[in-house]
Amino acid sequence: MKSSSGERLADRIALGVLTRVFPPELVDEVIEQCGRVEQRRRLLPARVVVYFVLAMCLFSGQGYEEVARLLTQGLERARRWEGLWRVPSTAAIGRARLRLGPEPLRELFARVCRPVAAEETVGAYYRGLRLVAIDGTTFDLPDTEANAGFFGRPGSGRGQGRGAYPQARIAVLAECGTHAVFAAATSPLATSEQSLVPRLLPALRPGMMLLADRGITGFELWRDAVATGADLLWRSASTWFCPCWPCSTTAPTSRRSSPPPTGADAPARSGSASSSTPSPTGRTRRSTA
């Protein structure tokens, strides 16, 4: 459905949700905390630039000026904007984004983004545990010398042997039932996905079950993830060998006839194939390839 001005009803709804999730009072607080309050009146104040960057995610297929038009119309309807305003040029928007910097967006993400699934959400829980997962991907970036120098380019089997665009690597912690991302870490392309995972672990909580693919598995990461109180279910390569230890000293086992060694002689326990480890809560963490 479109209005008489050609604007889609979905656009109005999306912008309404944006101002509800990120209320102006919170945006202003974050801007002040990060030291981005303007010293003089501007066509693009910091609050509007924050909403503009968020709106770019909603209207990723639109250009700068169209996103700015949709945003200001939405803010007017939400009574968050008063007075006349003209859409700034693409160059002016670019300069405003440079003035704002990444810090307010990072702080806003940390304050707002949380798991959102309810108990009845399909695929969100397993036996009372909230299912979350680590995943990674890469994003194309604008083709500038600065981006290419910092983030790097992927290799290519054609032409000059390099990709057309610089790329950033990102690892995220997401809720399985809703796909809501509540922790993220970015790096240059040459950085491994596994090395980004420690930056995500502080977002884990008891009552969560963390799923991870075998590219993430490692003793140090497993140890640090267990320390958060979350339960773990990780895949590992079938070539890994870890003995199956009994959860109780009186329980029989076909893999080991004597108690496991302790101290410096004990082998590392990890979330690998055919391993099971008792958790502090009494549940057994188990991983299979």
Image (tube, rainbow, N blue to C red):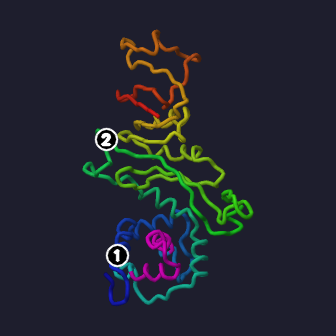
Query: Percent position (x, y) of residue 73?
Result: 40, 83
Comes first in the chain, label 1 or label 2 = 1
Mark number displayed over residue 10: 1
Q: Amino acid at mark 2?
A: Tyr
* Residue at the image position 53 percent from the left and 34 percent from the top: 237
The foreground one among 262 and 244 is 244
**Quadrant of the rendering where the N terminus is positioned:** bottom left
Q: Quadrant of residue 158?
A: bottom right
| Res. 99 mark | none
Q: Residue furthest front?
A: 158
| Label 1 with label 2: CB-CB less than 8 Å | no
The residues tagged by marks 1 and 2 sit, at their Cα atoms, a distance apart of 34 Å
Query: Is 275 rendered above or below residue 185?
Result: above
Please report the bounds of the magenta region as a residue range. Answer: 49-73
Residue 82 location in percent, x, y? 40, 85
Residue 65, compared with residue 146, is above or below; it is below
What residue is shown at x 43% (from left), y 55% (from top)? 181
Disc 2 element: strand
Residue sitting farthest toward the top: 258
| Above/below status of 252 relative to 9 | above
58 in the magenta segment: yes
Badge 2 is on which residue? 126
Q: Residues within 10 Å of mark 2 (few under 14, many from 20)?
A: few
Residue 48 located within the stretch drawn in magenta = no
Residue type, mark 1 in image: Ala
Compared to residue 260, the image places residue 187 above or below, namely below
Image quarter for residue 178?
A: bottom left
Q: Position of residue 232 (x, y in %)?
A: 42, 36
